[in-house]
Image: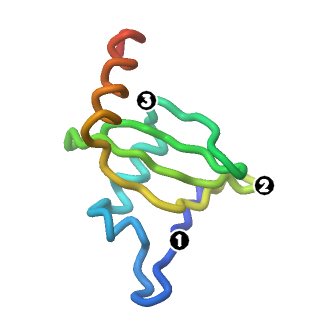
Amino acid sequence: MEIRYYRDPETGLPHIYEHGVTEAEAEWVLAHPGEDEACAGGSRQALGQTVDGRYLRVVYVPDEEGDGVFVVTAYPLAGKQLKAFRRRQRRRGR
């Protein structure tokens, strides 16, 4: 799967760096999502846990052709969002 990242116009670096997320973490969550659902404007979000135990939300847009994706942003889940995700995972038996 080809994965491209939105790059900050000022720094030229992937936007996910601003949230303390690496490409490897985002790619892991995309490959092993706990949840993957549609969002607004044709985008999708994958929620999951990294190998190191961090919980992330990765917002991406699937390519119209092929199996690639364009990652818009990714950030750690915290507070109520994290609590709700973990509760849903327990209910599903994961």
Q: CA distance from mark 3 to mark 1?
A: 23 Å
The answer to whether residue 74 is left or right of residue 66 is left
Task: Check disc 1 and give the amino acid type.
Answer: Tyr
**Residue tagged by mark 2?**
64
Q: Residues within 10 Å of mark 2 (few under 14, many from 20)?
A: few
For the point 33% across and 69% down, which residue is it? Answer: 17
**Residue tagged by mark 3?**
34
Q: Residues within 10 Å of mark 1 (few under 14, many from 20)?
A: some
Looking at the image, tell me whether mark 3 or mark 1 is earlier in sequence order: 1
Q: Are marks 3 and 1 in contact (CB under 8 Å)?
A: no
For the point 25% across and 38% down, which residue is it? Answer: 79
Q: Are marks 2 and 3 in contact (CB under 8 Å)?
A: no
- SS state under label 1: loop
Q: Nearer the viewer, residue 20 or 84?
A: 84
The answer to whether residue 62 is left or right of residue 54 is right
Task: Check disc 2 and give the amino acid type.
Answer: Glu
Q: Are marks 1 and 2 in contact (CB under 8 Å)?
A: no
66 is higher (above) or lower (below) than 11: above
Q: Specify whether residue 68 is in view.
A: yes
